[in-house]
Amino acid sequence: MWPFKKKSPPPTDGDAKLAAFAPLVLASDQVMGPQRLPVCYAYRSKPNNPHDSGWIFQSGSETQAWLDANPPKICPMESFIRMDESLLDIVRAEVGSAWERDSAQSPWRRIEGFRRRD
């Protein structure tokens, strides 16, 4: 057995930047930018780090092929909530939950029996 405690690596500038914008989400290109569509599909995976909320936000019209060619980007959750306060209705839901709606004006519906396909 090694007699010395293993030290954690020092935080990087990237870690500090992530912490400043946390909690973070992964967002499809379709729900970002000036021509963005509303978030109408969201699910929560197990977070990868302390800054990750686990949430993935999409428009709901993305195909898997499109997502493979255009991977989601890391974004601050706060920016999405400022644009759409209805996200507050779902972001406290547990890991493994999924939600959808027909439009930005429609209420969120929980997707029962959701299983993420990897």
Image (cartoon, rainbow, N blue to C red):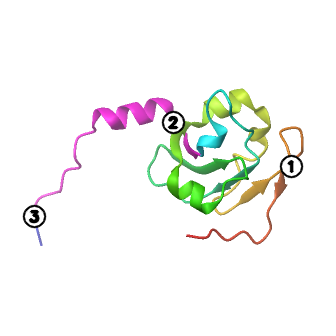
Q: Distance from label 3 to label 2 (Cα)?
A: 36 Å
Disc 3 versus disc 1: distance between alpha carbons?
Answer: 59 Å
In the picture provided, is 61 more to the left or to the right than 106? left
Question: Is 36 drawn above or below residue 90 in the view shown?
Answer: above
What type is the residue that disc 2 sits on? Ala
Identified by mark 1, the residue type is: Asp
Secondary structure category for the residue under label 3: loop
> Marks 3 and 2: CB-CB under 8 Å?
no
**Residue under circle 2?**
22
Front one among 4 and 117: 117
- Location of residue 66 by image quarter: bottom right
Identify which residue is drawn at 80% across, 37% down.
Answer: 86
**In the image, what residue type sits under mark 3?**
Pro
Residue 3 location, x and y as percent?
A: 10, 64
What is the number of the mark on residue 30? none
Tell me the number on the disc at residue 3. Answer: 3
Residue occupying the far left of the picture: 3
Q: Which residue is mark 1?
A: 102
In percent of width and height, residue 79 lies at 62, 29
How far from the left and from the top, in percent, is residue 57? 65, 47
CB-based contact (under 8 Å), mark 3 and mark 1: no
Inter-mark Cα distance, 2 to 1: 28 Å
Q: Is residue 72 left or right of residue 16?
A: right
Q: Secondary structure at mark 1?
A: loop
Q: Position of residue 117 (x, y in %)?
A: 61, 70
Which residues make up the magenta segment? 4-27
